[in-house]
Image (cartoon, rainbow, N blue to C red):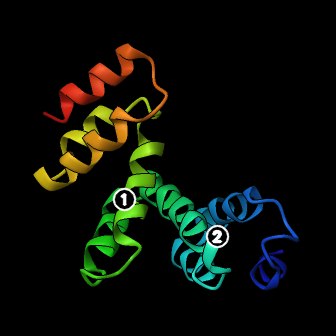
Amino acid sequence: MAEFLAKSSSEQVPTSAPTILARELARKNPLEAIEWADRLPQDRRLAAGGEAFAEWRRSQPDAATTWLNDLPLGDQRRLPYFQNAVKVLAWDPLAAEQLAALTDSERAVARGVIKTMPLSEDRRATLLEVLK
């Protein structure tokens, strides 16, 4: 399936297929999942890689964060991958603890993401309070 999606055009498969597969692949081998996502057509590459990274960060936050921070500053994956991880994290019951551990610059990005998410007002307020 991974090879089929990597070689298929965007018109041939639903937009959700690569992101679903990326999450599944990341549960087994996150780095391979991200490498696979990098081979997808341009219009699906960042979304699928972001899903793989978010899944990795959910299960292994330290390793995933180290990998992301080690990317070159100009790497186009840095911001969208982090933003996607925040979106996934916002729904996690333990989000407050992980958000509190972010750096100041990461907190600023996370605040921007959470402000635009379809969360209940109570949940949004709780998360934004942690990010102050």
Give the side of residue 86 with respect to residue 51, left or right.
left
Q: Which residue lies furthest to the right in this view?
A: 12
| Residue 116 spot, x, y in % from top left | 40, 35
Q: In which quarter of the image is the N terminus?
A: bottom right
| Residue 100 spot, x, y in % from top left | 19, 39
Question: Which residue occupies 49% across, 28% down?
Answer: 118
Above or below, 100 relative to 31: above
Residue on which the image places disc 2 = 44
Q: Quadrant of the C terminus?
A: top left
Q: Which residue lies furthest to the top in this view?
A: 122
Q: Which mark is residue 33?
A: none
| Residue 83 spot, x, y in % from top left | 39, 54
| Residue 16 spot, x, y in % from top left | 74, 56
Number of dots carrying numbers:
2
Question: Which residue occupies 54% across, 76% down?
Answer: 34
Give the side of residue 31 with respect to residue 17, left or right.
left
Above or below, 36 relative to 28: below
Gap between marks 2 and 1, in whole Å?
17 Å
Question: What element does badge 2 sit on?
Answer: helix
Give neighbour class at mark 2: few <14, some 14-19, many 20+ (Cα, 10 Å).
many
Which of the 4 image quadrants contains residue 49? bottom right
Query: Which mark lies nearer to you, 2 or 1?
Result: 2
Question: Which residue occupies 48% across, 44% down?
Answer: 88
Residue type indicated by callout 2: Arg
Tag 2–tag 1 contact (CB < 8 Å): no
Residue on which the image places disc 1 = 82
Above or below, 121 relative to 86: above
Residue type indicated by callout 1: Phe
